[in-house]
Image: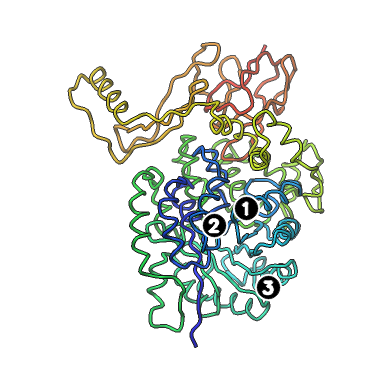
Amino acid sequence: MIKKIGITDTTFRDAHQSLMSTRMKTEDMLGIASKVDEIGFHSAEVWGGATFDSAIRFLNEDPWERLEKIKSLMPNTPLQMLLRGQSLVGYRAYADDVVDQFISSSAQSGIDIFRVFDALNDEFNLTRAAEAVKNVGKHLQMTLVYSVADDDGLNGKIYNLEYYLGKAKSFQKMGADSLCIKDMAGLLSPYDAFELVSNLKSTVDIPIQLHSHCTSGMAPITYLKAIEAGVDVIDTAISPLSMGTSQPALESIIASLRNSDYQFSVNPKLFIEFSDYIESILPKYEQYFNYQIASRVDAGVLSHQIPGGMISNLVSQLSEMNELDKLPKVLQEIPKVRKILGFPALVTPISQMVAAQSVNNVVFGKDKLINSQVKDYVYGLYGRPPASVDKKYISLALKDYPQGNKPISSRPADLLSSELDQAADEIKDLSSDIKDILIHVLFPTISKNFFGIKFGHIKVEEESSNTKESSSSKIEQVELNSDEVPSRSNNIRSFNVFVEDQYFKVDVDPINKNFKSIKKITKDRSNNVQNTNPISNESGDLRAPMSGIFLRYQVEIGQEVKIGDDVLIIESMKMENSIPSPVDKIVSELPFNPGDQVNKGDILVKWA
């Protein structure tokens, strides 16, 4: 008997999120979207995950416009998004009014299938999103986030067959139209997949889909065993953006099942045009493929369990901090932090939280700087962890925590007040569009700068190739006294440069492809040359221990502070970090404003 298997294409979302830090531009998706629509995919994952954040943070693109344009070119293919339950596409739980409106607006803009997940598989964080999807009449795909806490796979003490079957029953009762096994780190082994899918098929009566990554090298074989067990749909990516930390290659999976009892509804004759097009645009993103761990089998994932998308982002963010050499130690620290926090599955936003805290532990010392999200997690604002959080760590993390030192046991969102009205008021002079209001409530730190670009208040200038060539020629002649202009190498790096109210995209070509860092000598706002101490200089002024975005001060000018008092918050690696005072002194100057870019070593507070 022939069984038909559906294919969800991830090229426009998880594939480039996993391999190139979510940097694919809308224009490059639109260039092939109409052809992808003809292939016959079960669905195309084009939105959600990190794409929303990346569009406004790095690409200066409106994510809503991206979705609507793709929908106009792909009317025959159901469009799918990845939704982080109560966290939507952000990194914290949002109020119920935000959840309802975001899902309604997403449906109106073109989303047909909502893949809803929670990093902790906690129903507390899924109920409202599930209800909202059902209310707008769209397909609700609930997600089993797959993880392991030991080396026993599906036979583990925490994550095991009984655990997943129990969650599956619960999710079906919540109205799920289908279930997805989300194996974000490629940990699901082939025979465990066969057992899990077989038991799910006999436990629930809705379709089962499998999503995995090739990080550990097992995913293609795991897919084949899952298909034998009766899985209904699998996720793949077109070959140029497949494998490594991405999904198995579409073409290879189809070819592997040739002359079998399984058929696919896709048209293989259209694969080459899709593949050739993606191959043709990749050179412009070459800078994001510069770390091998994202493009090869990494057996270390069986230990650190960092998912595909997070590996490429972790590499990118450590590079920006000039700390890439510490990546091996960070990967060793991640399992330790995860154990302390009760073995949460490492998927957004928990993966970012654990990774950021691991970076802090390696760079600044064990538990010297606990980020705000970890404190919120320990308090219970991210839901119920699968195992108990270390009791000593609870005391450490919740010391002086504003809400108290005893974790909650209720639904986190019940503690949140409505947020949309306040967000609308905050940007009323910029926009009254509900989609812009949603951008602001989800990412208030970066939304104002994005709106400045979107509405023309901040000018974006693209240098022409002639201008770049002329500039390069001038620099070459003056600095090197040479008549030859160098050709552009494959090591080009792109940077966002802000000069007052103007914004420039600048390409920089390092003269040594093996460079580790670029040293910069800057002056603070009082023209005092900075030294290299990451915390304080000779006068004790508080300096930035990391690069990031300045969020807010927690002290005022004239206020007396003690050593260890929290004085300000910086967002780094998408996590909030409270920076303590290194001295007992009185505040005399607070030079930064919310939203300002902070470089490592910048003076953040001056003392009297």
Q: The C terminus lies in which quarter of the figure?
A: top right
Query: Between 1 and 600, which is closer to the camera in this rendering?
Result: 1
**How far across and how far down the image is residue 95, in percent?**
75, 46
* Residue linked to disc 3: 165
The image shows residue 420, relative to residue 560, as above or below, that is below
* Camera-side mark, 3 or 2: 3
Point out the tag, 3 or 2, that comes first from the N-terminus. Answer: 3
Binning the other alpha carbons within 10 Å of mark 2 as few (below 14), some (14 to 19) or many (20 upward) gives many
State if disc 2 and disc 1 touch (CB < 8 Å): yes
Label of residue 305 in the image: 2
The amino acid type of the residue labelled 3 equals Leu
* Camera-side mark, 1 or 3: 3
Binning the other alpha carbons within 10 Å of mark 1 as few (below 14), some (14 to 19) or many (20 upward) gives many
The amino acid type of the residue labelled 1 equals Arg
* Residue linked to disc 1: 338
**How far across and how far down the image is residue 241, in percent?**
41, 56
The amino acid type of the residue labelled 2 equals Gln
Q: CA distance from mark 1 to mark 2?
A: 10 Å
